[in-house]
Amino acid sequence: MAVIALLGLCILAWASRRRRRFHRQDAIHTGTIQLAGSLRRATAPLPELLDSVGDYAAYERAVFAAVRAAAQDTRQISSADEAVAVHDRLVAALGDLFAIIEVYPDLVADDATAARIRVVEDALEDAARRRAELTPLLRR
């Protein structure tokens, strides 16, 4: 009888571990999808934004290339770690781009450019929140 009880406890412990692992994997998968979606929304207005900035800042082509490369990387995310790394590269590249934009008063005053910047900033805020939720799940 004791053996059956012990076997039952072992089965319950095993099932509990599997369930926790399943929930963690599901949370990682969901977090990855949400982060990738946020990053894609952040990059959607980038072509028009880069065109606007490009007219004013021809000498900043390296920054534009970095932004374009980071934006392209968002379309190839295949894992949680990759999503976090793409987020970090995109945030760094966009920081440089936003610094360039601030130098040109005409760009800052342009309503269309300002609207695109707001879309990117809002999506990046969402992406940062989702990254913060996903990162602890990967550190286990």
Image (tube, grey):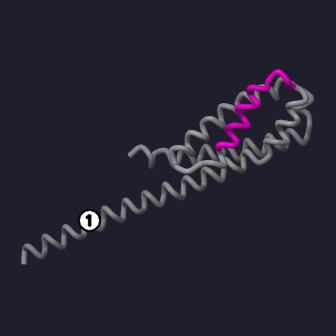
Q: Position of residue 17 (x, y in %)?
A: 31, 61
Q: Along the horizontal axis of the image, is 60 left or right of 38?
A: right
Q: Is mark 1 on a helix, strand or loop?
A: helix
Q: Where is residue 127 in the image (x, y as percent from the top left)?
A: 63, 46
**Amino acid under disc 1:** Trp
Q: In which quarter of the image is the N terminus?
A: bottom left
The residue located at (42%, 57%) in the rendering is 24
- The residue most toward the top is 59
The residue located at (49%, 54%) in the rendering is 28
Q: Quadrant of residue 116?
A: top right
**Exactly how many numbered labels are in the figure?**
1
Q: Is residue 51 above or below residue 44?
A: above
Q: Quadrant of residue 25?
A: bottom left
Report the front residue among 67 and 34: 67
Q: How crowded is mark 1: few (under 14 residues within 10 Å), some or many (20 or more)?
A: few
Report the front residue among 20 and 25: 25
Q: In this view, does 61 lie above or below 27?
A: above
Which range is magenta? 57-73
Q: Does the magenta stretch include residue 65?
A: yes
Q: Along the horizontal axis of the image, is 19 left or right of 110?
A: left
Q: Does the magenta stretch include residue 109?
A: no
The residue located at (79%, 24%) in the rendering is 60
Q: Main secondary structure of the magenta part?
A: helix
Q: Along the horizontal axis of the image, is 33 left or right of 68?
A: left
What residue is pinned by disc 1?
A: 14
- The residue most toward the bottom is 1
Q: In this view, does 66 lie above or below 120?
A: above
Q: Along the horizontal axis of the image, is 65 left or right of 107?
A: left
Q: In which quarter of the image is residue 52?
A: top right
Q: Where is residue 113 in the image (x, y as percent from the top left)?
A: 87, 39
